[in-house]
Image (cartoon, rainbow, N blue to C red):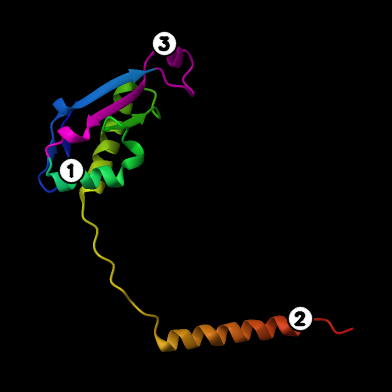
Amino acid sequence: MRDLDLGDGTLVPASLLRAATSRAGGPGGQNVNKVETRVTIEVDVDSLPLPDDRKARIRERLAGRINKAGVLRVTSQAERSQLANRDRALARMEELLSGAITEQAKRKASRVSRAQKQRRIEEKKRRAQTKKLRTTFD
């Protein structure tokens, strides 16, 4: 297994990752019944070589994927080979962790311009007029 590169020089050593295999469903004929191609990669969030604020950010943003023991788990069974599924799971783990530790930019408050409000009202009036003309008179 390879190390995970989370960007900005942060590496998660492969020694912190655990991989488990199991039989996957789906197409594949006898291969499915005989070979363990599903790969699950796990990492303990507390053991990651990151500052506490980043670990907290990971726990917050990936709360649905982290179990009560604090273990983040990613599974892949899309491919027919164990090696390809392991590569996919590692890439997904890398993507999730790097996405979770990046700081999101603060949202800048903005206002709708007066001209934009006016255009919206005019369009509503035009639309109402069009609909009003469709009514039938008895």
Circle nearer the N terminus (1, 3): 1
Residue hosting label 3? 34
Circle nearer the N terminus (3, 2): 3
**Which residue lies at the image location 28% right of the left edge and 71% below the top edge?**
108
Callout 2 touching callout 1 (CB < 8 Å):
no
Rounded to the nearest angstrom, the CA distance separating label 1 from label 3 is 35 Å
Callout 3 touching callout 2 (CB < 8 Å):
no
Give the mark toward the camera: 1 or 3. Answer: 1
Q: Is residue 133 left or right of residue 126?
A: right
| Residues drawn in magenta | 23-49
Residue 91 position in % (x across, y down): 27, 36
Q: Is residue 128 left or right of residue 56?
A: right
Residue 22 position in % (x across, y down): 37, 18
Viewer-nearest residue: 72 or 34: 72
Q: Amino acid at mark 2?
A: Arg
Residue 94 position in % (x across, y down): 24, 39
Rounded to the nearest angstrom, the CA distance separating label 2 from label 1 is 60 Å
For the N terminus, the image quarter is top left
Label tally: 3
Q: Above or below — where is 94 with respect to 8?
A: above
**Which residue lies at the image location 62% right of the left edge and 86% below the top edge?**
126
Circle nearer the N terminus (2, 1): 1
Residue hosting label 1? 6
Write down the quadrant of residue 74 in the picture.
top left
Rounded to the nearest angstrom, the CA distance separating label 3 from label 2 is 67 Å
Give the mark toward the camera: 3 or 2. Answer: 2
